[in-house]
Image (spheres, helix red, strand yellow):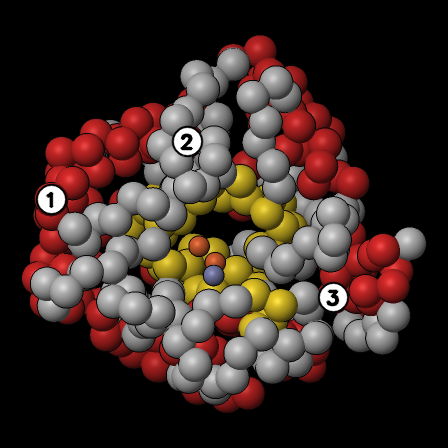
Amino acid sequence: MELIIGSHVSFTKDEQLLGSVKETLSYNANTFMFYTGAPQNTKRASIDEKLTTQALKLMKDNNIDIKNVVVHAPYIINLANSSNFDFNVRFLKEEITRTEKLGVKKLVIHPGSHVGFGIDVGIQNVIDSLNSAISDNDDVVICLETMAGKGTELGRNFDELKQIIDGIKLKDKIGVCLDTCHLNDAGYDLKNFASILDEFDKIIGLKYLEVIHVNDSKNNLGSRKDRHENIGIGTIGFDTLINIIYNDKIKGVPKILETPYVGIKAPYKYEIEMIKNKKFNGDLINDILK
Ligand code: FE
Ligand code: FE
Ligand code: ZN
């Protein structure tokens, strides 16, 4: 099986999914992830069917399997905060519908922050929101992302994610997204990725693993910071990331880069090339800026 790798791409009002696919192809990637609008707000344009059809055709022509494509829900939605319960549920339902209209099957969401109410209350709020938003005929899997543990963030370890999953009624609609930067910042030493994966399998179950976010980190192990770095330049390092990307047990899981732009330029084409070559490019930043 070929490596399934891509990056975060844009989804603009004018070109929508078609633009996302074109951008993906420019990086020589075979999958991608996008927000259906600005990540920091919940304003969303309606989905243009014609653009979607054209996008799906372009994907087909280029062997991009829609099953590997990912939507990321806006990060200002905080499912752990029950004071926004009705809004959260309504928005998440709409986001599921938008994701379905685009043909995408995976929707990543941050579990949320308990904002002082405590971990257990926060987790219960996440469970209640998800159970209200998810319905049996949805054709989308909601993927809970592992978090760095910044502030009162939930989902900073496998036990917290397991606690959420345990409360979900429709278990076939729920999955997990591992983010390497977040794992590192939460204190998981990725040099031992094989044992981390074993722990994941024991606590949650590998079948729940739907997406991997591949990022290096600007901060040290256990820093609880969440600042992404370009591949091979951060504290996780190139060899450790390659070891994760090519792990046999997660071959079929899409790998998505969310590394920072260098100036105004996207790094993804260059990072994907390094990953495919399994060789770190010491001139990465210069090559991107060229
Ligand atoms: Fe995320
Ligand atoms: Fe992420
Ligand atoms: Zn992050």
Q: Position of residue 113 (x, y in %)?
A: 24, 59
Residue 68 falls left or right of residue 144: right
Decide: few, some or many residues near mark 3? Use Cα within 10 Å; few <14, some 14-19, many ≥20: many
At mark 1, the secondary structure is helix
Mark 2 and mark 3 residues within 8 Å of each other at the beta carbon: no
Q: As drawn, which residue projects farthest toward the right?
A: 290
Which residue does the numbered mark 2 point to in the structure image? 99
Q: Residues at badges 2 and 1 in contact (C-beta under 8 Å)?
A: no
Specify whether 274 is left or right of 226: right
Q: Amino acid at mark 3?
A: Ile
Q: Which residue is mark 3?
A: 275
Is 166 rendered above or below residue 158? Answer: above
Name the disc covering residue 127, or none. none
Quadrant of the rendering where the C terminus is positioned: bottom right
Tell which circle, 2 or 1, labels the residue nearer the N-terminal end.
1
Q: Earlier in the sequence, mark 3 or mark 1?
A: 1
Residue 56, x across and y down, in percent: 61, 25
Query: In the image, what residue occupies the spot 25% across and 49% down?
Result: 78
Mark toward the viewer: 3 or 1: 1
Question: Is the CB atom of the residue marked by disc 3 within 8 angstroms of ligand 2's nearest atom?
Answer: no
Which residue is labeled 1 in the image?
A: 83
Q: CA distance from mark 2 to mark 1?
A: 25 Å
Residue 87 lies, in percent from the top left, at: 19, 33
- Give the amino acid at mark 2: Thr
How many neighbours does mark 2 have within 10 angstroms: few (below 14), some (14-19), or many (20 or more)? many
* Residue closest to the eye, 137 or 70: 70
Q: Earlier in the sequence, mark 2 or mark 3?
A: 2
> What is the distance, in whole Å, between disc 2 and disc 3 at their CAs?
29 Å
User: Three-letter amino acid code at disc 1?
Assistant: Ser
Residue 12 in the image, given as x and y percentages of width and height = 59, 27
Which residue is at 65% across, 39% downward? 64
